[in-house]
Image (spheres, rainbow, N blue to C red):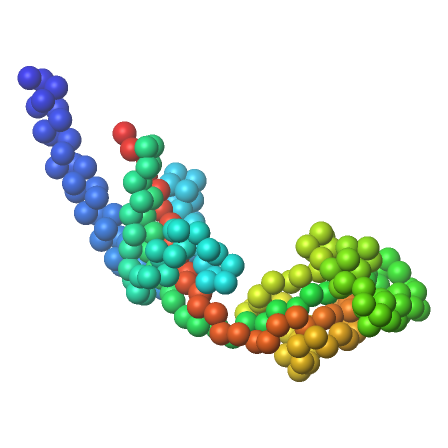
Amino acid sequence: MKQLFFLLLCIPFLSFSQDALETKLDSINSIEDAEIFAKAYKKSNKSKVFTFNKEKHKTRLADELFKLSRGGKKVVKGDYKTTYYKVIEKEKTLHYRASYIFFDGDEMTLEDINEKRDKIISQYQQGYKFDKLAQLHSMDLNAKKGGDLGWFPEGGNIHPMFEEAVKNHNVDDIFTLDIEDRNWYYVVLKTHDSKTIEEITVLQYSEPID
């Protein structure tokens, strides 16, 4: 009888907590709000804000979230926790795609870099695969992926000079790029036409199941 009484006391409390959470999530309507919330509950509830890109993310969860409108929520119940997702922003952004071979001007002379770049371009034009050349020569961790940068958004985190150079070339153009103030030197291959891709910014929050 005491156990039943205790359980009955707990039910309103659990219900109130759920309502409070729903109210809090409903009040979050901007990326800034979501980031403040995620920071506050990062350790205790694994809360975070992340972006899904329709070209990169092909999981079942991503597909289901893309079906939601802005402000839409999804609840995923597991064996040990319940995870809440809310779509904060939903937009379509122009993206570009290229592959590159990077040379660090702090490690090599410009003369040596230019000599290597001329040879690489010549080899590519003779039929060598760009990804193999990147694996052999690029001084960047991206060499493991054959230099493929993947789809990157207009006005994103890519250096503006790099973005502008890719934007102004045609598909299959191979060219050099110097960003001298950073001592960064590239051979770049534009691999795809520009493309509008849908992205969503999502807030995640998890609660353990007692």
As drawn, the residue found furthest toward the top would be 1
Q: Quadrant of residue 167?
A: bottom right
Compared with 89, 47 (above or below) is above
Q: Nearer the viewer, residue 122 or 182?
A: 122
What is the x, y in percent for residue 188? 74, 70
Left or right of 156 on screen, residue 27? left
Location of residue 19 in the rendering, given as x and y in whole percent from the top left corner: 19, 47
Residue positioned most to the front? 127
86 with respect to 182 (left or right): left
Q: Residue drawn at (15%, 31%), measured in percent from left and top?
A: 10
Q: Is residue 140 above or below residue 177?
A: above
Residue lying at 41% horizontally and 63% vertically, measured from the top left: 200
Residue 194 in sight here: yes
Vertical relation: 133 (above or below) 14: below
Residue depicted at 12% across the width and 24% down the height: 6
If the image is split into quadrants, where does the N terminus sit? Answer: top left
